[in-house]
Image: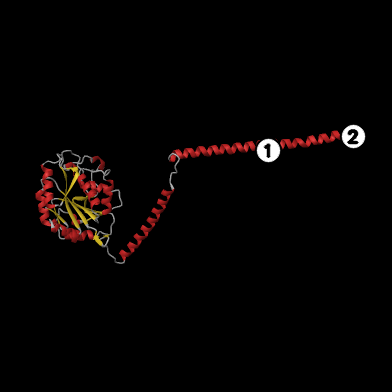
Amino acid sequence: MLSRGSNARLSGMAFRSRVPTLLLSMFATFASIYVAGRLWQDAQNRVYLIEELDKITGQGHSAISVDDTLKIIACREQQKKLAALEMELAAAVQKGFTWARSTETNGTHSKKRPLVVIGILTKFGRNNNRDAIRKAWMGTGGALKKLENQKGIIARFVIGRSANRGDQFDQAIDSENRKTNDILILDDHVEAPEEYPKKAKLFFAYAAEKWDAEFYAKVNDDVYVNIDAFGATLATHMDKPRVYIGCMKSGEVFSEPGHKWYEPDWWKFGDKRSYFRHASGEMYVISQALAKFIMINRAILRTYAHDDVSAGSWFIGLDVKHVDEAKFCCSSWSSGAVCAGV
C-alpha cells in the first residue's frame, strides 16, 4: 500500500514527462506551419514567374513550338547534307569533271535550262536601234526561236509604259510587239530617264520569275553582242553559284546638279566621292541566285542615279564573286570580245 508521499512523487514524475511531449508537439506544429508556408510562397513565386514569362513569349505560348524545333533540326540536317555534296562536287571538279547545263524533267520529256536571259533595255522612239539589233545578232521569228532552243539564249527588249497610259508611245510599242513578239513590257514601270535604274531592277525580278535560267544579263540597246563568244564566256563561270560579271570600274561621283552624271546621293560615297567597284552599265551578267535575290528583295533594294551603280550596291554586302571580264568592256573592241558599242 502506497503512502501519501509516494503518490505525490508519482504525480510529479508524470507531469514532468508530459512537459517535453507538449513542447515537442508544439515545435513540430510550428515547424510544419513554417515549411508549409515556405512551400506555398515558392509555389506562388513560380506561378508569378511563369505568368511573366508567358507575357514576354506570347500570351501563354511557348517561345519555340515542337513544330519549330523539328523544322530547325531538319534544316540543320539539310545543311550537313548540302555541305557534304559541296565537298563531293569540289572533289569531282578537281578530278576533271565539267559542268553541264541543268535540265528539267516533265514526265517523259526533258528540257534544258536556258543558259542566259538577255534584257536589252530600250526606250520610246528607239525602234531603229531595235531593228539594228534584230538584224545584227538577235534575229526575229524562227531565228529568235533557234537562238533559244539551240543555244539556250533568250533575248528580249525591255521597256515600261508611258506616263500618259495608252498614248501614241504605248500604242507604237504594242503594235511593234504584235509583229515581233520580242518585247518585254513592264506594265508597272513608267518610262522616265530618272527611273532607268528601277527598270533594270524590275527586269531582273521579272526575268527570274518567268525564266529559270543559269544567268541573267542587262544590255543597252546600242550594244552589239557576239553571241557565240558570249555563250562560251558564260560557260566558264557555271561553277560559281553567286557571280557578278562585267567590265569592272570605279568612277567619280558628281555632286553638281547640272552635271550629266549627277548623283543626288553623292554624300553617301565618302569624302573622296568615288563609286565602289561595279560593272559598267553597257553590259553585265548575274547568276540565278543573285537574280532571285533581287526578285525577293526588290521592294527594299535602293537605286541610285545609274543602273550599274545600283546593281553593284545590291551585291557589295553579299558573298558574291566579282569577275572583271575584259571581254565585257564594250567601249574597246578587241579580238574575242563579247560586245561593242555602236
> What residue is shown with label 1?
28
Q: Position of residue 212 (x, y in %)?
A: 25, 55
Q: Secondary structure at mark 1?
A: helix
Question: Mark on residue 154?
Answer: none
- Quadrant position of the N terminus in the picture: top right
Is 1 on the left-hand or right-hand side of 256?
A: right
**Vertical placement of residue 134 versus 258, above or below:** below
> Left or right: 6 with respect to 187?
right
Kindly indicate whether the residue at mark 2 contacts the one at mark 1 (C-beta within 8 angstroms): no
Q: Callout 2 environment at 10 Å: few (<14), some (14 to 19), or many (20+)?
A: few
Regarding residue 321, the answer to whether it shows in the image is no
Q: Amino acid at mark 2?
A: Ser
Q: Where is residue 244? Give x, y as percent.
A: 25, 53
The residue sitting at 66% across, 35% down in the picture is 30
Q: Residue at x 51, y 37 (%)?
A: 48
- Distance from the alpha carbon under mark 1 to that under mark 2: 39 Å
**Residue nearest the observer in this picture, 104 or 136:** 104
Q: Find the residue positioned furthest to the front.
A: 107
Relative to 246, residue 46 above or below: above
Q: Secondary structure at mark 2?
A: loop
Residue located farthest toward the bottom when viewing the structure as drawn? 95
Mark 1 or mark 2: whose residue is earlier in sequence:
2
Q: Quadrant of residue 28?
A: top right
Q: How many marks?
A: 2
Three-letter code for the amino acid on which mark 1 is drawn: Ala
Could you say where residue 146 lies in the image, as x and y percent from the top left? 16, 60
Name the residue rendered at 87%, 35% in the picture: 6
x then y, percent, for residue 68 = 41, 48
Write down the residue under mark 2: 3
Q: Is residue 88 left or right of residue 40?
A: left
Q: How many other residues sit within 10 Å of disc 1, few (<14), some (14-19) or many (≥20)?
A: few
